[in-house]
Amino acid sequence: MSSHQDGPVRCPKCGHQSVSTVRQIIAAHDLAIKAAFIQGRLNRVQCPECKASFTPTVPTLYYDLEQAFAYVFAPAGPDRAANVRELVAALKHSLPPEQLTPSLAHPNRFATRESIIQAILAADGITPEVQRTQAARGKLLDELLQSPSEEALRAKATAHDADLDPAFFELLTAHMQAAHMEGDQDRAQTLLAFRTFLGQHSSQGRAAIAAIDTRLGLEVIQSREELLAQLLQTTDADARAALVARGHVLIDQSFFQLLDASIDQAAHAGDVSAAHALYVLRAALPGLMAEQEAQTRAALDRAAALFSQIVSSPQPDQVLEQNRAGIDEAFFVVLGANIERARRQGQQEPARALELIGQLARTMRQPA
Ligand SMILES: [Zn+2]
């Protein structure tokens, strides 16, 4: 027996029996296969008779060399013990003897697909307790966002100082990116201002935000004044466009008011060249903004199309492989937003599957 095998499968809808190739051995390091299994997409077949698609129940062995354990999913039935024996024998056959630890040779058994998937998530650190912590973090974020006043927000932030940890700021940043991706710039901007505020009023915030932004390559510009100063210092067209992209959420009505006030100030002070530079910048901004929006939208559309192609494919690793050039920052934004959405809806399996796709995509990402 190899990791792939042809076997009879019966359509649960019309009862038609057909032969399909199914995979019964899954390695934890095979991220795409693992993701598909966790999401119930592995071995999915379409009935040749009625065209319904379904996932046949096949005994499956999952093993993790790094953590040195194996689990086996063996549905109750007369062949149960034989199925387990066959799968363990196949695993033994496929591994070099030095890798075959006793725990791999004696896998824990699970009678349902749900129970083995929960055990796999737990082994990955996503225990029921972690799931509860994630839910509590989301609830705290909602409560903070609904604070009726700045004072109330400050008081609540102080009371929850220990909970405003790096993981909390990860979540907040993911919300911010999701809003940006969905084209909701008002919300993205509100969340940015909110994040900056919490960064200043919590003991771990500032360092957490800096670490996240460095990792994401976000280089978020924190204030309108800072953005204006940087824009004025930059005369190169490409560099200016890049600044507009980075500071996009800050360029709003208040920003233009700040710009107008600066023009007045320079004019009153008789600084003609400064007033002129400000005026030229003001004239150029709407065009730069429109260009930036169009580019962002196009990049996100491309990323979203690639994303949906990957998650609907039985071979996500191959789709990624064929689209290496498309694995860019926008792709990770789309991916992150979808992981966050799945988590918010309590869908741990798809969230984990997408994380694995993300890990795989990172290994394939071409250097920029
Ligand atoms: Zn059928």
Image: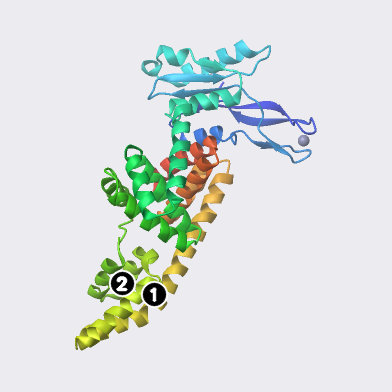
Residue drawn at (41%, 69%) of the image:
292
Amino acid type at image mark 1: Leu
Disc 2 residue: CB within 8 Å of ligand 1: no
36 vs 310: above or below: above
Residue 124 x/y as whole percent:
43, 29
Disc 1 is placed on an element classified as helix
Instruction: State the quadrant of the N terminus.
Output: top right
Q: CA distance from mark 2 to mark 1?
A: 9 Å
Q: Mark 2 = which residue?
A: 240
The quarter of the image that holds ligand 1 is top right
State yes or no: discs 2 and 1 in contact (Cβ < 8 Å).
yes
6 vs 186: above or below: above
Amino acid type at image mark 2: Arg
Disc sitting over residue 331 in the figure = none
N-term mark: 2 or 1: 2
Residue 142 x/y as whole percent:
47, 46
